[in-house]
Image (cartoon, grey):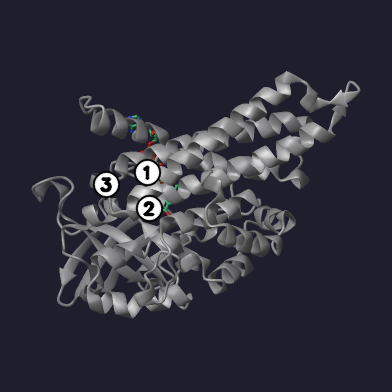
Amino acid sequence: MADESFPEIREAVRRLCARFPVAYWRELDRERTYPTEFVKALTEAGFLSVLIPEAYGGSGLGLRAAVAVLEEIHRAGANGAACHAQMYTMGTVLRHGSEAQKAAYLPKIASGELRLQAFGVTEPDAGTDTTRITTFARRKGDMYVVNGRKIWISRAEHSDLMVLLCRTSPRDEAAKPSDGMSVLLVDLREAVGRGLTIRPVRTMLNHATTELFFEDLEVPAANLIGEEGKGFRYILDGMNAERILIAAECLGDARFFIDRASRYARERVVFGRPIGENQGVQFPLARAYVQATSASLMIDAAASLFEAGQPCGAEANMAKLVASEASWFAADMCLQTHGGFGFAEEYDIERKFRETRLYQVAPISTNLILSHVATHVLGQPKSF
Ligand SMILES: Cc1cc2nc3c(=O)[nH]c(=O)nc-3n(C[C@H](O)[C@H](O)[C@H](O)COP(=O)(O)OP(=O)(O)OC[C@H]3O[C@@H](n4cnc5c(N)ncnc54)[C@H](O)[C@@H]3O)c2cc1C
């Protein structure tokens, strides 16, 4: 089975997570604080650098190993969203950065000396239509001057660097709407207070997400990744890894809910028998397991294609869709199985329920995945 891959890594992640029990996450959730100690432990254990090649100080184990790490974190009741982007955001630098940029940043990201876990794409007035972003970087000598606004930029307060997508030519002057966007690597340590303001956005889950305001922020032109105007393509090709890894987190959540519900259904006695003896309780549990197992196979297939350097856009999207639906079905099933106790904070189900709901909206919503499959795989006419 796909969930038995990398047994040593899985066991090591389980041991690490056991040091950060659900009570730790419950407290952070209540206070909306960042899991600094957990992220530090994961970094020190090398789990966040599995995608960085050995030549740059990572372990270069590949995407299936990263899947195992994030799945186990989530199965333990923890939340990898605090730091999952440290694993894959560097991919933009790795694939499109100059040799000098790679040498300067990747070894420090691998060691954890530098945190690159902020990824600035979404804007309030553009939504999923990324070509409509208006945050603009104007070239001035050896600097870019950035003005604009971003929303939902997670972990910006807990990151040293940010991969920022902005326009370098207006949409209506570009040959195609997706041309004229560029990627800048922003040093947040220098930027905050000198043209960049970060404002936290409180949400239904503990996610350290923020709103960013750029007012004449100067970014050295040397921090441009790849060629000016080609940034959209660079961002797109990092998204497959992100979708597969988010799917792994959903799968871990689904397994958490199935583990919890199975145990509770065996132990909770009502009407003189365990509730699990009723098929009305058993069948949703079994269905959740079937869905999680299918998602696991889809994730493994997508990750294998990614590792082989094959096109995997459709598979990455489908893995994310089935896994986020499996985790949401499992969440609902687990809450229902627990009856009233599912709503009690101390059971951690309501927290995980809130956390896993996010993944049908971010990083890409279910509708947009269906649209991709309909038009790119099934040859249907585009609706937008
Ligand atoms: C907690 C959180 C963290 C996030 N972190 C980041 C981050 O770190 N960096 C970043 O850049 N972004 C981040 N995001 C943004 C996230 O990627 C977007 O919220 C997501 O892609 C959806 O975009 P939107 O919110 O603009 O929805 P919209 O694009 O406004 O869409 C709203 C709804 O309409 C539907 N819809 C829109 N157009 C169509 C269509 N043509 N056909 C059918 N349905 C359609 C969508 O499916 C969606 O359900 C985060 C969001 C959240 C909530």
Q: Position of residue 194 (x, y in %)?
A: 36, 74
Disc 1 beta carbon < 8 A from ligand 1?
Answer: no
Q: Position of residue 370 (x, y in %)?
A: 35, 31
Q: Secondary structure at mark 2?
A: helix
Q: Kindly identify the residue that appears in the image at 64 percent across and 28 percent down.
A: 286
User: Mark 2 sits on what residue?
Assistant: 241
Q: Quadrant of ligand 1?
A: top left
Which of disc 1 and disc 2 is earlier in sequence? 2
Q: Kindly identify the residue that appears in the image at 30 percent across and 34 percent down.
A: 372
Which of disc 2 and disc 3 is earlier in sequence? 2
| Quarter that holds the C terminus | top left
Determine whether, in the image, residue 311 is placed left or right of residue 158: left
Task: Between label 3 and label 2, give the one nearer the viewer.
Answer: 3
Q: Secondary structure at mark 1?
A: helix
User: Mark 1 sits on what residue?
Assistant: 316
In this picture, is 161 found above or below 266? below
Instruction: Examine the rendering and report whether any part of residue 185 can be seen.
Output: yes
